[in-house]
Amino acid sequence: MPASDNIAVSFVASLGRVAIQTILEMGRIALFFLNSLIKTFSPPYSLKRLLEQIHFIGMKSLFVVSLTGLFTGMVLGLHGYYTLSRVGSEGLLGAAVALTLIRELGPVLAALMLTGRAGSSIAAEIGIMRISEQIDALDTMDINPVRFLVAPRVAASIICFPLLAAVFDVIGIIGGYLTGVCLLGVNSGIYIAKMEAFVDMKDVREGFIKAFVFSLIVSIVCCYQGYTTHKRKGGFGARGVGESTTTAVVMSSVLILVVDYVVGTFLL
Amino acid sequence: MNDIRPSEPLIQFRSVRKAFGDQTVLDGVDLTIEQGVVTTIIGRSGVGKSVLLKHVVGLLRPDGGEILYRGDNLLTLSRSVRRSLKSKISYMFQNMALFDSMTVFENIALPLEEKTRLSKGEIRKRVFERIVQLDLGDFPDKYPAQLSGGMRKRVALARALITGPEIILFDEPTTGLDPIRKNAVFNMIARYQREFGFTAVVVSHDIPDVFQISQKVAMLEEGRIIFDGTREEVLSSRNPLVRQFIEGQENPETTLVSNIPEEDAK
């Protein structure tokens, strides 16, 4: 066979392999996604494990989410003021800050912070349980590992993400108030009044829907990466867990931004 | 041979094959595990003994052949039968597989908490019974990482025994234990086996100690069972591979050299 044929054939073959692998992986993720949802919403529920996860995912992230919320709001106040003052409408600062936070930045940034803080540790924890055969041990005890490990984390995320996004919004609005009103001298009554006038219930709803969607993405992607650590090619043991954690965080973060756009378009 | 009670086949392997990638591990395994009997599987490290055990609990599926449970194919059992079978089997992992973010107590109690409707007090009572029996009385609140290898082994044993299973698979239950504890573990397996009559499959390198508790011995080599018989039969076997393995354990200086021509001869 001539060399050019070989190259052409091997190119097509490798292309096909990549395509098949990608589709298989997407199928596996989809099945895991469905399975996790079923296990999350069907009894028996474990209140104890749910509360543990709410404490871990939600409660322990409160500080870091508040902090990022505060500074995001302050930056928005700062830049919003200088942009709006050019067209003489700094009175709209409250509305601008609140709308940006409630519709976009609150859910997105809170989800990104939660991915870094909770998602990474979910992937690492489940990954270590996988490589040390603890998940197999659960299976041999007839304890469903998805129900035992994944369901409480998904349920806790569904509860915590919207709440933390709301916390982010409120603290961000206070941050905007600090820079806009306290430092740069926007009238405080106007800041609040314009915010009240421009923010609809629809905007708040959109923020919550996004936070809910992100909660599913982050929790299930991170659980999936940890859960399938042993199937990684080329990464075994500690390195495999490291790679799973990295993939979990990168994939979650990218998906948050992509899905944010898609959901945002549908909800406009 | 008088100590073998008449028994029926509980689990049967029929030409079971399993390969990981291009590495064939099991290449037509035929083995019968009889009810109420302790069967020991011996064989060199890496020969696939753990792989064999994992097929019984369903952690691995055979590429070919079949595994029968009371005459029914394990893979085609209905969901409910398979679950009820799972609840009767305990598997003690070679590397223990303890839940490392749970305490010793929580580890042992987990199967009872999840799979039974016992009261908290009753679970506590049963777990502490095991903890005391296994000499773990000082460490119920410690985490596995804070224990020595031998202690972890005993925690894993306690966890495997806690549900009173009918079939227990022990994957190297005594590796890494000191001689006294090793005998204690063997004695305990034997005692519980007499008491509860469970079926046990033991993978062990502790030859000849493990023969004390086993009624049947099978040897796995090159993906097949090359010997299957009673304790007495294995000790008097003329099969050169079996002899070499058993004696090799006793005379380590002679085996490494004598291994080579045997391997080539096959």
Image (tube, coloured by chain):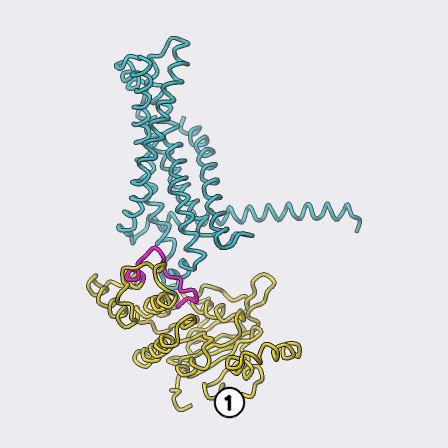
Chain colours: A cyan, B yellow
Residue A116, above or below A241: above
| B127 vs B137, nearest the viewer | B137
Residue B100 part of the magenta segment: yes
| A26 vs B253, nearest the viewer | B253
| A213 vs B232, nearest the viewer | B232
Picture quadrant of residue A84: top left
Left or right of B161, for residue B223? right
Residues rendered magenta in the picture: B92-107
Quadrant position of the C terminus of chain A in the picture: top left
Left or right of A174, for residue B121? left
Residue B7, above or below A176: below
Q: Check disc 1 and give the amino acid type.
A: Ser
Picture quadrant of residue B1: bottom left
Residue located beneath label 1 in the image: B236
Q: Is residue A131 visible?
A: yes
State the image coordinates of residue A165 (x, y, percent, origin top left).
Answer: 33, 33
Secondary structure beneath dot 1 equals loop
Residue A30, above or below B95: above
Q: At 56% from the left edge and 65% from the top edge, which residue is drawn?
A: B19
Q: At 27% from the left edge and 18% from the top edge, which residue is drawn?
A: A192
Q: At 28% from the left edge and 52% from the top edge, which residue is drawn?
A: A46
- Toward the top, the furthest residue is A88
State the image coordinates of residue A171 (x, y, percent, origin top left).
Answer: 30, 27
Q: Is residue B65 visible?
A: no
State the image coordinates of residue B222 (x, y, percent, origin top left).
Answer: 58, 74
